[in-house]
Image (spheres, grey):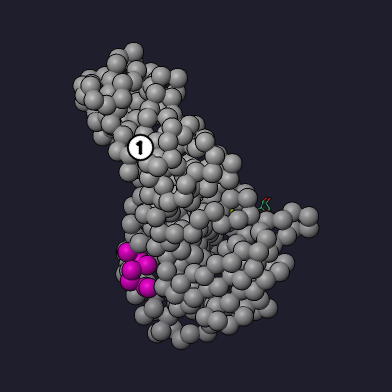
Amino acid sequence: MAEIQLKNVSKHFKDVVVFEGLTLTIRDGEFFTFLGPSGCGKSTLLNLIAGLEEITDGEILFDGQLVNDLPPRQRDVAMVFQSYALYPHMTVFDNIAFPLKMKKYDKQTIKREVEAVASILGLKGLLNRKPRELSGGQRQRVAFGRAIVRRPRVFLMDEPLSNLDARLRVEMRAELKKLHKELKTTIVYVTHDQAEAMGLSDRIAIINEGMIQQCATPVEIYTRPKNIFVATFVGSPAMNLIEGELLSEAPLRVKAGDLVLSISTEQPPRTDRVIIGIRPEDVEVSTSGETCYAATVELLEPEGARIWIDLIVGNIKIKGYSSIGTSISPGQRVYLNIPVERVHVFDPVTKQRL
Ligand SMILES: Nc1ncnc2c1ncn2[C@@H]1O[C@H](COP(=O)(O)OP(=O)(O)OP(=O)(O)O)[C@@H](O)[C@H]1O
Ligand SMILES: [Mg+2]
């Protein structure tokens, strides 16, 4: 088990600056995820922690011990990648056993350990098969097995589920979460899939443009996004952003198109304009309710239990929802219910939450 500290870590590839002065503590036993768009540096960060890449500046510590100069093997981390990288000519048993054989464990110990891991991962009946005789999900489980059997201090996982189809990915997500509960080992996980990050993690660091935009629990990130990037990166469909104009400061009243909202913020706006953020799942559309905002339906997008609805309210467009089965059609006049306590307010210049 290990706590991982990054202190003022910078990483440059020649003239490409990936990170500059990154500071972060990953707690012992935590399921910690780096989430961000492609190219933001997630894999690079993982490689720095693993020791596969050298840091340009700063310090990395495991349980308070500086590991900057330790090669990957001595850091005692196990990595799982997107591509399973199993040995095709070896059986499942031998693939999982491989790290123990390298460490020259005796045969009996190896057998016991491999069987224990196979049992955790539901691979017991497959130990004599070769990778080509397995499904994608089973192969990825073997790759997890090979990492687990080493009982490392830290697991580093770089998009381990992204080669699987959508359904299997969701299944494996649940298994991975169970696995973490059992093992209680620190997991540092990388993904660009926000649903995966939200579902798996104790905490998430959202990365963009070489910086941590927010580091918090999934609930905190969803309910109190720190800035516009986080607000729109997390949540699907993306949060509605509307320019608003201040009508009064105390109490704070904002006019955004035809919407007039009384909202409370932690900090007072610095200008007479703000950006209002409303999640589509917080805009309830109904066919009656004269006391609410009136809107016109533009487009309907059914998805599972909900219909996402593009709406026109005066001169603004906003996305809302209704439950499936509600009879609504384009052009229809409808009414919106928006709980003001769920409305987010951002500074238009700094893009930070107010
Ligand atoms: N060896 C390298 N030499 C030069 N630049 C690199 C090298 N490795 C990565 N980069 C650059 O560093 C940045 C971060 O890359 P990285 O692979 O860490 O991104 P990522 O967040 O993992 O992206 P993805 O989601 O696509 O996997 C990118 O701009 C990339 O081009
Ligand atoms: Mg990557």
- Of residues 352 and 142, which is closer to you in this image? 352
Q: Which residue is outermost to the right?
A: 14
Q: Position of residue 305 (x, y in %)?
A: 26, 34
Give the SS element for disc 1: strand
**Residue bounds of the magenta highlight:** 178-184
Q: Residue at x 47, y 47 (%)?
A: 268
Q: Position of residue 88 (x, y in %)?
A: 52, 60
Q: Where is residue 265 in the image (x, y as percent from the top left)?
A: 41, 47
Residue 332 appears left or right of 344: left
Label 1: which residue?
262
Disc 1 residue crowd, few under 14, some 14–19, many 20+, Cα 10 Å: some
Q: State which quadrant residue 271 falls in.
A: top right
Q: Position of residue 139 (x, y in %)?
A: 44, 57
271 versus 140 height, above or below: above
217 versus 102 height, above or below: above
Residue 172 appears left or right of 25: left
Residue 15 appears left or right of 311: right
Q: Is residue 21 magenta?
A: no
Residue 109 appears left or right of 293: right
